[in-house]
Image: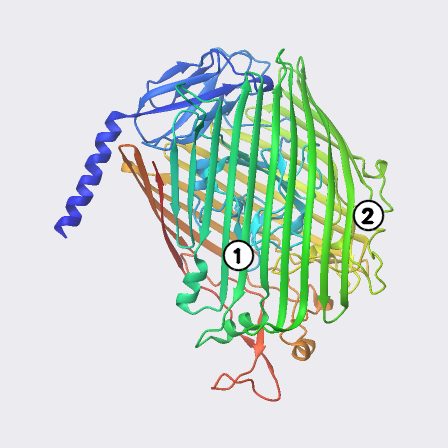
Amino acid sequence: MKKTIWVLFALFSLQAVVAQQGVVLTGIVKGKAESPLLGATVLLEGTEYVTTTDENGVFKFEQVVPKTYNLTVSFDGYETQTVFNVIVKSAGNAELTINLVESAQELTEVVIKRSKLKRSKETPLSIQSLSAVEIANYPGSNNDVVRVAQSLPGISPSPGGFRNDLIIRGGAPNETVYYLDGMEIPTINHFSTQGSSGGPVGILNVSFIDDVTLSTSAFGSQYDNPLSGVLQFKQRTGSATSYKTNFRLSASEAAATFEGPLFKGNKEKSNTTFLASVRRSYLQFLFEFIGLPIRPNYWDYQYKINHKIDAYNDISLIGVGSIDEFSLEASNDLTPSERAVLEQSPYIEQRSNAIGLTWKRRFKNNLGNAQTTISNNYFKNSFVNYEDTVNREGIIFSNEAEEIETKMRQEFTYYFDKVKVTTGFNGQFSSYNNNTIDSNTGTYSTSIDFFKYGFFANASSSFFDDRVDFSAGFRFDDDTFLDRVSLLETFSPRVALSVKLGQGYRFNASVGSYYKILPYTILGFRDQNGELANKNGNYTNSTHYVAGFEKAIGEASKLTVEGFYKKYRDYPVSLEDGVSLANKGGGFEVLGNEAIATNGRGRTYGAEVMFQQKFVKNFFAIASYTFFYSEFSGVANQYLPSVWDSRHLFSLTAGYKFKKNWEVSLRNRFAGRTPYVPVDQQQTLAAYPEIILDYNALGTRKLGVFNQLDVRVDKKWNFKKVALDVFVDFENLLAQRIPQIPQFGLLRDENDAVVSPRQLIQVDNSNNTIIPTVGLVLDF
């Protein structure tokens, strides 16, 4: 006991010594066309530190005491911006990048007494951003970037709350697109649902992320295929001066991240940097130890190499990928629910890889810039259900598929006085191969390839001394595969307006039409005659109408009220089950491997209230409430509540930072009663272990309410050249019963033998367990 006390005393004493010594904090400030700004004023709030940027836009503070700060940047002709919640550590500090936005108003003092929250002219509403610090310390997220995004306003939790599906304002999980540094990445989760996008664990490493932005309406015209959301991940660049290592350890995985300069020689800074990581799961060992029958096993990797050619040109090579294996193994003394999981779960093997090369070019007159991205996405999925899962005998369903995309995106941005114009094009070559064995519908093989291309443009400006922001844009899309689609038919215009009303109020509105091509699983499906059954399908269309008011409360808080209406047409409808595919894709399955008709309709509409408080006086919070309806039509062309129609969504995330680097944060999510598709017990008994759902009963039954509180406690130490964060995370701290879709299995006797004749019974799959997690983050 005495030794422990002395060790703790030594830790705190050493921390105090390092805190007195201080560390270096650096960053770069950029303006129009991402040009470096000379002479920008940078203030570290709460201190006497004030400096200006040099000719390269770089600022530097020395002897900064490790703690959390807000950093404010101002420059004549630009809006003052504050970077909130900047954590300064004794090791592992990343260089900050601050991009200022032009303003018609002249600055008269370093800190202007107005809202410091960022605002976009192109997407003035229904948009949220999270910094790297906010993501890394999120309670209940286990450092999962996608799971953090689930807590943003208007996002429904997945059934059971354990998957990373982004269900935005009543839309389906596959209605969101994902971009990493401007490169589209279709697969962002381990054990991803093919044809959709969700999965239980995210692939991206939080140590790479600079910030995350989610748009739930008013999407930029440069993004193709969104129906409900665009999630953008911006990565930071590796250190140009020294080598650094970040190590993360949690209850389910371990990750190591390395960064530093390449070819530095005797120079102070290198023009070439690298950032690389690898992550390994050990859930399979944990589940084996406690006797569970599932064995999820995964690796993932991520890298970024950046080279600064000169003052106007940068080139980056980025990549991310995963290796996934989901297997099953019989254990002794299985509960009825665990036995049902063993008998009904699939074997999954997946490989994914995305790699891209981006060239960023800034025009020498600072009147614009260009970005060219060439990328390749690869996804291979092996998904098999067996009659006998233990011995892998008797195939019920088998899907062996491969998706390959090669893409090019060219984007130009020009600045004409107060007008910003963005234009460009994108093209891709897609290849899809699939072999399917279905004990119910038969066997088929397919191999297709085609080109897809699009053109886009957008213009935005401010008028009347920045009181009115206006943006308008459009895009066209077409491909060489679908028979009924043409370039003009996919014309998708969008406009956005933001008006300053005085006293901190703004009125925001947007209208936009968006198109999405059908998933490869639908495009490549062949009927019993070997014909491509869905070649005459259409692109799915959604039109968003959004309007609301925003009130700035002080410099770091705001309150928003929005009403929204999403109208869908040409939504794919399952000809076999008679329902919209919007009701599928939220589980371990293959979405869309069937004949469809693109004549479905849909509508989601409601209102949303949100309050946001950025980090001020050691406190931050974001709270939102959404009331909505979500309805889609099936073969009968009648609207029915979707399986995402919970009507009520509430989310609260808050945190407080105490003295001596103690932090407490919490997240509470609530969703109302959600419809589900019940099991057809008679057909399931005949087909068991295959589960047959009764889609005719959709909307007749609902799950209980979802309510989950997660709390995280962090303690940080700053030693000499080493920073340590130890955290304890409690998921479902109040031990609330998490609603689960009813689960069925076969009746067994006391010897675990199936009773004859077979009988189907409902098993208890309730979950009200508190899940504690202990982890650490080490920087050196």
Please, is residue 714 above or below residue 329 in the view? above
Q: Mark 1 points at which residue?
A: 161
Question: Which type of secondary structure does the marked residue at label 1 adopt?
Answer: loop
Image location of residue 557, percent across then percent down = 48, 32
Residue 773, quarter of the rendered image: bottom left
Q: How far apart are marks 1 and 2 (CA)?
A: 33 Å
Q: How many marks?
A: 2
Where residue 109 appears, as percent x and y from the top left, is: 45, 12
Horizontal and vertical percent position of residue 775: 36, 49
- Kind of residue at disc 1: Gly
The residue sitting at 55% across, 42% down in the picture is 320
* Secondary element at tag 2: loop
Q: How many other residues sit within 10 Å of disc 1, few (<14), some (14-19) or many (≥20)?
A: some
Tell me the quarter of the image containing the C terminus.
top left
Q: In screen coordinates, is 64 left or right of 79?
A: left
Callout 2: few (<14), some (14-19), or many (20+) C-alpha neighbours within 10 Å?
many
Question: Front-most of 745 and 502?
Answer: 745
N-term-proximal mark, 1 vs 2: 1
- Please name the residue that numbered disc 2 is placed on: 538
Residue drawn at the location 49% of the way across and 73% of the way down: 330
Question: As displayed, is residue 280 above or below residue 548?
Answer: below
Q: Which residue is drawn at 68% across and 63% down?
A: 699
297 sits to left or right of 605: left
Amino acid type at mark 2? Asn
- Indicate which label's residue lies in the foreground, 1 or 2: 2
